[in-house]
Image (tube, rainbow, N blue to C red):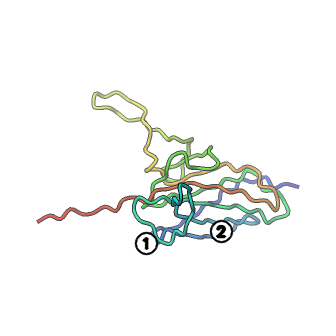
């Protein structure tokens, strides 16, 4: 027997001084663990290091592992990863590569997102939305068999800190 229900699992976390969330979330038989790592380069090789603290411009990798601890398959699983303020999604770093994105967590569309804009002369044009504006990523995981896991990842860059101008 298979469960045939739409499941969307999401994380909500706030990145303040520390960018190293290790979160666990459970929805029935599906447990999710989110970990962030700082991406560094050593000897021309990428290495994932502790992300306890991150500086502006550094790259972090978010890795969410969805584990089905149940005895039945979970169908139509959707994995949702928020992109918190203070970081910017890096295009083409999502894995699996087929990913949806959202600006508000309600409406999702295939990446890259686009929007209609009016030009100064009144024409309507379609423009790509900068990936830095994305606030959520979503993957259609599909069926997650019993006792199996799936991993989704995405990379973000820590945004520059806005500095107030010193006025006299």
* For residue 26, side relative to residue 164 (left or right): right
- Residue under pointer 2: 25
Give neighbour class at mark 2: few <14, some 14-19, many 20+ (Cα, 10 Å): some
SS of the residue under disc 1: loop
Asked which quadrant contains residue 168, the reply is bottom left
Q: Which of 151 and 139 is in front in this view?
A: 151
Asked which quadrant contains residue 98, the reply is top right
- Residue under pointer 1: 17
Q: Which residue lies furthest to the left in this view?
A: 168
Q: Eyeballing the image, is 107 above or below 42? A: above
Q: Residue 99 carries which label?
A: none
Q: What percent of the width, then of the height, locates residue 79?
A: 64, 55
* For residue 161, side relative to residue 89 (left or right): left
Q: Residue at x 41, y 65 (%)?
A: 55
Q: Nearer the viewer, residue 13 or 60?
A: 60
Q: Nearer the viewer, residue 25 or 39?
A: 39
Q: Which of 57 and 22 is in front in this view?
A: 57
Q: What percent of the width, then of the height, locates residue 105?
A: 53, 54
Q: N-terminal of the two: label 1 or label 2? A: 1
Q: Which residue is drawn at 43% across and 32% down?
A: 126
SS of the residue under disc 2: strand
């Amino acid at each position: 027997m298979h469960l045939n229900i739409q499941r969307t699992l999401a994380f909500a976390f706030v990145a303040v001084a520390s960018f190293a969330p290790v979160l666990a979330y459970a929805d029935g038989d599906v447990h999710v663990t989110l970990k962030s790592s700082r991406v560094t380069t050593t000897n021309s090789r990428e290495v994932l290091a502790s992300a306890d603290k991150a500086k502006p411009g550094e790259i972090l990798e978010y890795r969410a592992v969805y584990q089905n601890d149940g005895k039945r398959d979970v169908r139509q699983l959707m994995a949702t990863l928020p992109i918190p303020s203070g970081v910017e999604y890096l295009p083409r770093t999502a894995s699996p590569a087929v990913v949806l994105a959202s600006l508000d967590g309600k409406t999702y569309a295939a990446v890259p997102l686009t929007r209609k804009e009016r030009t100064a002369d009144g024409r309507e044009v379609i423009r790509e939305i900068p990936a830095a504006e994305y606030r959520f990523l979503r993957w259609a995981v599909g069926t997650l068999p019993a006792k199996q896991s799936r991993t989704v990842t995405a990379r973000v860059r820590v945004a520059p800190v806005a500095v107030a101008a010193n006025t006299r």
